[in-house]
Amino acid sequence: MEKKISYYNNFSKSKFSKLTIQERFEKIYNENSWESNESRSGIGSEIKNTKEVLRAINQIIKQYNIKSIIDIPCGDFNWMSSLDMKNINYKGFDIVNSAIEENNKNFKKTNINFYCSDITSSELTKGDLMFVRDCLVHFSYEDIKKSIFRIKQSKSKYLMSTSFVNLEKNIDIYSAGWRPVNLEKEPFNFPKPLITFNEKCNEMDGIYADKSICLWEIEKLPDLS
């Protein structure tokens, strides 16, 4: 039987059946249910697990002349705060109010701002790069499709998002759980990415070694609405 991250089985439909999607993620964040001593956004947001992602973003910024980044969900900004943003207009969005309040208190600058937003239902701000890491893996098929609709609606140029590129078949879950997602497989059928960066993920003894951050042109994404 495949090993899974320790919180995988804790987030059942019954536990969250009476909560809105915002209430679910606020509960998880405020109770540190993702079990990281460094970041309440989870172990995937620890500095040691994001070095390759930072390299990838820096490459994309230079290669595609990125001047504005929309980061959703931004979480607690633990690792993203290491990115050189002196020439970037950065807007971080998250569904968790307390995360946004803390980020604006600790990190807000003229070119760095944070806002509360639900990617499944809110109109998203336009940017050169829409960065959506470790987000869709927590959503049901329905909420992933809603998110992609909002991303396309924003008219942003590029999307960087998490994809487990060797996964053969996706499964559906109740939003607030977790499982790997391959965006190139059914029912999403994304085109081949412009660039794929392997994150060199060694969590859970390397069973998710195919975890990647991929770049797509948003206008070429399929219509999933």
Image (cartoon, grey):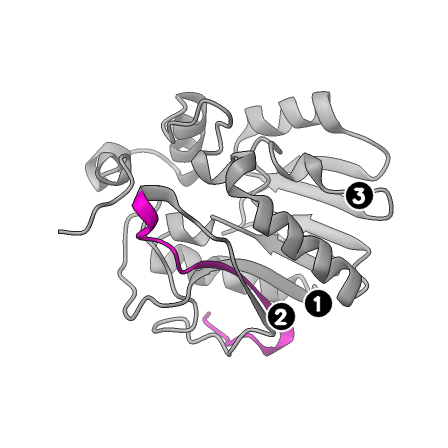
Which picture quadrant has residue 110?
top right
Residue bearing mark 1: 157
Q: Nearer the viewer, residue 5 or 67?
A: 5
> For mark 1, does the 10 Å Cα neighbourhood hold few (<14), some (14 to 19), or many (20 or more) residues?
some
> Regarding mark 3 in the picture, which secondary structure is present there?
loop
- Tag in front: 2 or 3: 3
How far apart are the alpha carbons under marks 3 and 1?
Answer: 19 Å
Q: Residue at x 75, y 36 (%)?
A: 113
Residue bearing mark 3: 85
Amino acid marked by disc 3: Met
- Mark drawn on residue 220: none
Q: Nearer the viewer, residue 79 or 40?
A: 79
Amino acid marked by disc 1: Lys
Ranked by sequence position, the earlier of labels 2 and 3 is: 3
Residue 99 located within the stretch drawn in magenta: no
Disc 2 vs disc 3: Cβ atoms closer than 8 Å? no
Res 22 seen here? no
Q: Residue 42, position in %: x, y? A: 44, 34
> Regarding mark 2 in the picture, which secondary structure is present there?
helix
Q: Nearer the viewer, residue 65 or 202?
A: 202
| 124 up-or-down from 224: above or below | above
How far apart are the alpha carbons under marks 1 and 2?
Answer: 6 Å
Q: Residue 178, position in %: x, y? A: 33, 46
Disc 1 vs disc 2: Cβ atoms closer than 8 Å? yes
Which picture quadrant has residue 100?
top right
Residue 60 in the figure: left or right of residue 43 = right
The magenta stretch spans which residues?
205-225
Q: Residue at x 43, y 49 (%)?
A: 201
Residue bearing mark 2: 218
Residue 170 in the figure: left or right of residue 164 = left
